[in-house]
Image: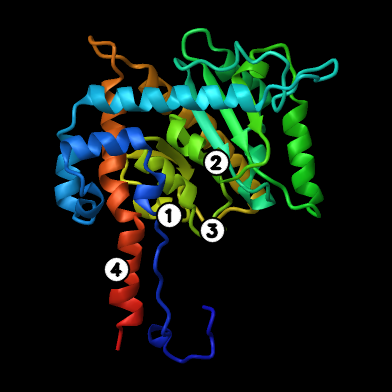
């Protein structure tokens, strides 16, 4: 479609290579230790073999995976409490700064991360399209949800700035102020804590605008479950078990219709699938079905979206293609 003057579309010399991320850089040390103990010190080489890697991950004890994740979640919460604590907040606390952060966040609550450039197509405001419904999820007595946001807006992007201002202004009679945070100055350090410590990594771009989405790959390698629109890398990686999809691939919608449909899909998937799965415990007190999804995420997505696979694709299909 980009080269309409060519008579034979099949002759267009264009292909694609999906991005990947460097596993030894982004996989948390606690998980690397588990891999070394169960797979070997050369785990980052074994990950190149899909079948061997997947078998090894599936054989790991659920308790080891869950305990490692709980450790990382606790580190994330400690980081959030320190990062959002401010000596002077004026008369009103906001989700980016508070005087007292001791009661902020709980390791026992489902934690969803959303860290993106604040651009219109990223649809930061999709989650807030039905604020009463969102706050019901946050305030649920038995199965609450907490959110950690991070991102930056371009200095000249007024729409993005407005989105952030609206996010900051939410201050209703609810638990929002202690179950939602915005981490400022989003950088590699912030990203590391987030992708390693959240339970769920959310992404809601407007199809088909997402080029890739490497942050979701980093989260998957640490056992976080992706909760995303079927676009970018997720349309390649999602297998129905290793995370959750938002919406479908319907292309016969206007932008407004797509936003409405995706917002409804986001809320209904949270309410009916994702939240119940997280809070469903087995007789040992473990969310065994959730852990099975975590293991499937690590097993299937780490090899598929590692930089090793990416470089191999370039060598096989681009550089050495006669």
Which of the labelled discs sits on residue 208, or is there none?
Answer: 3
Residue 39 in the image: state x and y as whole percent: 17, 41
Answer with mark 1 or mark 3, whichever residue precedes in sequence.
Answer: 3
Residue 283 in the image: state x and y as whole percent: 23, 9
Distance between mark 4 and mark 3 Cα atoms: 26 Å
Answer with mark 3 or mark 2, whichever residue precedes in sequence.
Answer: 2
Residue at figure coordinates x 35%, y 48% from the top left: 24
Q: How many marks?
A: 4
* Residue at which label 1 appears: 233
- State the residue in front, 259 or 42: 42
Residue 203 at least partly seen: no
72 displayed left or right of 123? left
Which of the labelled discs sits on residue 303, or is there none?
Answer: none
Q: Residues within 10 Å of mark 3 (few under 14, many from 20)?
A: few
Residue 228 in the image: state x and y as whole percent: 47, 43
* Residue at which label 2 appears: 189
Residue at figure coordinates x 45%, y 45% from the top left: 216
* Residue at which label 4 appears: 312
Q: Depth-wise, is mark 1 or mark 3 nearer the camera? A: 1
- Picture layout, residue 220 above or below residue 173: below
Answer with mark 2 or mark 1, whichever residue precedes in sequence.
Answer: 2
Task: Find numbered disc 1 in the image and state the secondary structure of the residue it sits on.
Answer: loop
Color theme of the render? rainbow
Distance between mark 3 and mark 2 Cα atoms: 29 Å
- State the residue in front, 207 or 139: 139
Q: Residues within 10 Å of mark 4 (few under 14, many from 20)?
A: few
Answer with mark 4 or mark 3, whichever residue precedes in sequence.
Answer: 3
């Amino acid at each position: 479609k980009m080269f309409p003057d060519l008579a034979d579309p099949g002759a267009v010399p264009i292909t694609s290579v999906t991005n990947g991320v460097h596993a030894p850089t982004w996989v948390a040390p606690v998980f690397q230790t588990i891999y070394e103990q169960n797979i070997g010190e050369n785990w980052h080489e074994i990950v190149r073999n899909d079948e061997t890697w997947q078998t090894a991950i599936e054989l790991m004890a659920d308790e080891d995976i869950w305990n490692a994740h709980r450790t990382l979640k606790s580190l994330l919460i400690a980081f959030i409490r320190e990062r959002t604590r401010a000596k002077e907040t004026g008369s009103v606390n906001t989700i980016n700064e508070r005087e007292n952060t001791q009661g902020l966040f709980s390791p026992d609550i489902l934690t969803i991360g959303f860290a993106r450039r604040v651009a219109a197509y990223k649809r930061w405001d999709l989650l807030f399209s039905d604020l009463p419904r969102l706050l019901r999820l946050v305030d649920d007595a038995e199965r609450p949800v907490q959110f950690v946001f991070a991102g930056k807006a371009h200095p000249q992007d007024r729409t993005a700035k407005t989105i952030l201002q609206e996010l900051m202004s939410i201050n209703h009679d609810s638990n929002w102020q202690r179950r939602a945070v915005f981490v400022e100055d989003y950088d590699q350090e912030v990203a590391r804590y987030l992708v390693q410590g959240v339970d769920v990594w959310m992404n809601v771009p407007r199809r088909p605008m997402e080029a890739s989405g490497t942050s979701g790959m980093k989260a998957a390698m640490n056992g976080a479950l992706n909760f995303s629109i079927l676009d970018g890398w997720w349309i390649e990686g999602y297998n129905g078990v290793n995370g959750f999809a938002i919406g479908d691939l319907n292309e016969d919608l206007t932008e407004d219709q797509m936003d409405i449909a995706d917002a409804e899909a986001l809320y209904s998937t949270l309410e009916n699938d994702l939240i119940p799965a997280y809070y469903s415990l087995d007789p040992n007190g473990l969310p065994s079905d959730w852990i099975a999804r975590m293991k499937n995420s690590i097993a299937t997505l780490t090899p598929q979206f590692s930089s090793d696979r990416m470089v191999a694709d370039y060598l096989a299909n681009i550089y050495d293609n006669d």
